[in-house]
Amino acid sequence: MPAAFRVVLERLVASSLPDDDDEDDWKHEWVRFCEEGLELTGGPWEGDKEEKVKWIDEAVSAFAARAGFIDRIKVMAEGDKQ
């Protein structure tokens, strides 16, 4: 799931700005999810390429943490050590 989320965000960042008149535009929906659901600040179109990559990384990390992926991976890794 985090890898698929990253692909969506990469497409989002590579796309043009959303139409301000169309609140149902897919771009608005994804940005709204990142702002409200993941509590990210700033936007995917602000800054240079490095800042955009950082925004994507932060979004994916927040998404993974929210879904508990990191905790599950740690538990699985600890189980393999025993």
Image (cartoon, rainbow, N blue to C red):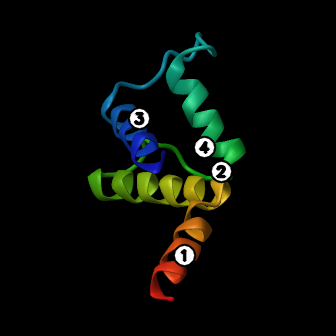
Q: Which mark is residue 38?
A: 2
Q: Which mark is residue 34?
A: 4
Circles 3 and 4, Cβ within 8 Å, touching? The answer is no
Name which residue lies at 63% across and 16% down.
23
Name which residue lies at 61% across and 70% down.
71
Observer-nearest of 69 and 44 = 69
Name which residue lies at 47% across and 21% down.
18
Mark toward the viewer: 3 or 4: 3
Q: Callout 1 environment at 10 Å: few (<14), some (14 to 19), or many (20+)? A: few
Q: Secondary structure at mark 1?
A: helix
| Residue at image mark 1 | 74
Residue that extends furthest to the right in the rendered view of this protein:
36
Above or below: residue 71 compared with residue 29: below
- The disc labelled 1 sits on which kind of residue? Lys
Name which residue lies at 60% across and 26% down.
29
Q: Earlier in the sequence, mark 3 or mark 4?
A: 3
- The disc labelled 4 sits on which kind of residue? Cys
Q: Earlier in the sequence, mark 2 or mark 3?
A: 3
| Residue at image mark 3 | 8
Q: Earlier in the sequence, mark 2 or mark 1?
A: 2
Above or below: residue 60 compared with residue 80: above
Circles 2 and 4, Cβ within 8 Å, touching? The answer is yes
Observer-nearest of 74 and 80 = 80
